[in-house]
């Protein structure tokens, strides 16, 4: 019993200690962002590897999800004779939920894990220590540009995901199943609200981008500097991001869409 | 031994203690490293020589004691002051610690690009001068993955001196080098030290080589300074530590083994 309590206490302490370190680290990274904006070269390189290189998987997943969604919704909607509503139904599902959530999960698998592994290996090979001894702050030089790149990429990736998803469902619904093209678009235009739906979806993706990138760079920076430590940190990045994104999604959805 | 007066001492260590968890690495260590001197730290593997350099560089915080560099106590400095001080310190890491995503040239140029606004042409000249000094001017386009361990260390050396700091710390600069390169690097360290008026701290096991260029040696073992003095003083001293280390004898006060229970007991306990 005492043992068990001790274990619980130790676990709790180390959890809160890590949380504190994570917050300090976040603060420090945010302080580094102005310097990155002055010298954007480093961030642009990261935008490429974090953002541009993720476009492929985002686009492919987007089109697949859109097609499946189009097909499933069509089957249900025809039962009610409401197949012209395919456009708004698919668009709302993508813009409000699937776009931000799925692209955040894919982002963490594709880019977040890579960020963790890269920073973790830089730590394990003493590159971060070396930088410190050359009076270059690794949080400013290495972490801040990556952080900002992730923050900027995520909403754009989510937008790409939703847009391509809508095209996928258009292809299935209009192209293959014979929904009227005019109805598909005009219904969508009428039902999807810029503020209520699109802005809220964007806010979600900004929040997810923030959390996913923060977890990724922190796990890398805080990893145990060994082969095993880095591999564990990489796994943790993907798992923790998934939990955080799904949990936050519920909270944000309740706040944004809960009262109507 | 005459005591150097305060202004001449660049690094002054007093009562320094450090431990990893419950394991004491350094215990109440005092050292003086004089300006313009090449000071060498020797000691068996795993005694905390690298740890000592990291304490001087402010990467680790001591449990107790003072580490004064140029009159400032390193553990007391805030982030910005520490970074200001580090601009004037060079460090060559035991593992090289080169940036794997940058070429040899860019690695050496890194501190110059970060801390100066020199024009590109001048940076190029400075980098080539440093690379020429370590004999790797021809390797400037290679990536760190394409270097041998010894070459990587020489690039790290070129990078450590890139900003012409007031002091340089070398962690095992000779390990993994062929005898010709050892000679060249030794002369390089001494020449840089004298021509540029630097102070150098070397951590090394290569007793014969390093004592030829050192002004002062410290031997540490089990967390304590066990012998110190000029190389010739140490060679003639009666200190068993010094004799064992300088002559490379396996038996003596320095233990070859990491602390463990008796070997027989360990073997028997498996049965
Ligand atoms: N992160 C750590 N946690 C616990 N112990 C550590 C850690 N890092 C180093 N040590 C211990 O500290 C001691 C000193 O390490 P250090 O790297 O300073 O040795 P060293 O004198 O440089 O040895 P070498 O000549 O082999 O490079 C070692 O015995 C090592 O076991
Ligand atoms: Mg060492």
Image (cartoon, rainbow, N blue to C red):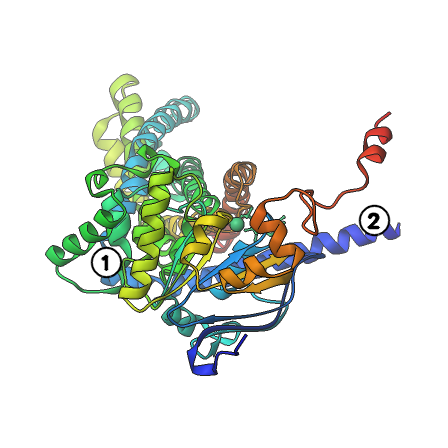
- B246, above or below A166, in the image: below
The residue identified by callout 2 is: A4
Q: Is residue B56 left or right of residue A203?
A: right
On the image, numbered disc 1 is attached to which residue? B113
> In which quarter of the view is residue B48 placed?
bottom right
Q: Residue at x 56, y 66 (%)?
A: B61
Indicate the chain on which mark 1 is placed: B
SS at mark 1?
A: helix
In whole angstroms, how far apart are the C-alphas of marks 2 and 1? 54 Å
Instruction: Indicate the quadrant where residue A184 lies.
Output: top left
Q: Residue at x 34, y 51 (%)?
A: B157
Q: Is residue A69 left or right of residue A34?
A: right
Side of B117 where A255 appears, left or right: right
In the rendered image, the residue lying farthest to the right is A1
Numbered badge on residue A233: none
- Residue A166, horizontal then vertical, whole percent: 30, 33
């Amino acid at each position: 019993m005492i043992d068990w309590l001790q274990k619980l206490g130790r676990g709790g302490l180390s959890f809160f200690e890590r949380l504190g370190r994570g917050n300090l680290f976040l603060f420090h990274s945010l302080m580094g962002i102005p310097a990155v904006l002055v010298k954007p070269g480093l961030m642009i390189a990261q935008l490429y590897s974090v953002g541009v290189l993720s476009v492929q998987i985002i686009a492919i997943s987007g089109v697949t999800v859109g097609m499946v969604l189009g097909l499933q919704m069509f089957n249900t909607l025809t039962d009610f004779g409401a197949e012209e509503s395919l456009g708004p139904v698919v668009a709302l599902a993508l813009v409000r939920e699937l776009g931000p959530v799925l692209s955040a999960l894919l982002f963490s698998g594709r880019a977040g894990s890579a960020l963790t592994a890269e920073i973790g290996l830089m730590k394990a090979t003493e590159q971060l220590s070396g930088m410190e001894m050359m009076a270059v702050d690794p949080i400013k030089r290495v972490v801040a540009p990556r952080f900002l790149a992730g923050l900027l990429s995520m909403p754009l990736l989510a937008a790409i995901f939703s847009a391509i998803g809508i095209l996928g469902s258009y292809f299935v619904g209009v192209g293959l199943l014979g929904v009227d093209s005019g109805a598909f678009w005009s219904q969508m235009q009428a039902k999807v609200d810029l503020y209520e739906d699109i802005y809220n979806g964007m806010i979600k993706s900004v929040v997810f981008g923030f959390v996913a990138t923060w977890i990724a760079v922190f796990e890398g920076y805080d990893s145990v500097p060994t082969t095993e430590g880095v591999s564990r940190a990489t796994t943790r990045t993907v798992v923790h991001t998934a939990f955080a994104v799904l949990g936050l999604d519920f909270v944000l959805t309740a706040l944004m869409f809960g009262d109507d | 031994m005459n005591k150097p007066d305060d202004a001449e001492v660049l690094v002054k260590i007093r009562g320094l203690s450090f431990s990893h968890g419950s394991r004491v690495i350094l215990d109440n260590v005092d050292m003086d490293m004089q300006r313009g001197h090449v000071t060498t730290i020797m000691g068996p593997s795993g005694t905390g020589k690298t740890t000592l350099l990291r304490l001087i560089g402010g990467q680790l915080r001591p449990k107790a004691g003072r580490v004064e560099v140029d009159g400032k106590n390193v553990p007391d400095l805030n982030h910005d002051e520490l970074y200001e001080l580090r601009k004037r310190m060079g460090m060559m890491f035991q593992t090289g610690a080169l940036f794997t995503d940058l070429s040899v040239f860019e690695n050496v140029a890194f501190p110059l690009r970060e801390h100066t606004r020199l024009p590109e042409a001048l940076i190029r000249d400075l980098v080539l001068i440093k690379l020429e000094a370590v004999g790797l001017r021809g390797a400037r386009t290679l990536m760190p993955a394409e270097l041998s361990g010894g070459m990587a260390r020489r690039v790290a050396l070129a990078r450590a001196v890139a900003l012409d700091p007031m002091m340089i710390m070398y962690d095992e600069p000779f390990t993994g080098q062929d005898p010709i390169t050892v000679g060249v690097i030794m002369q390089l360290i001494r020449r840089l030290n004298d021509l540029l008026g630097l102070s150098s701290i070397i951590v090394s096991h290569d007793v014969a080589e390093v004592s030829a260029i050192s002004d002062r040696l410290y031997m540490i073992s089990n967390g304590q300074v066990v012998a110190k003095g000029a190389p010739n003083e140490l060679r003639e001293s009666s200190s068993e530590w010094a004799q064992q280390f300088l002559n490379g004898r396996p038996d003596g006060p320095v233990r070859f083994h990491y602390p463990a229970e008796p070997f027989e007991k360990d073997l028997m306990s498996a049965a």
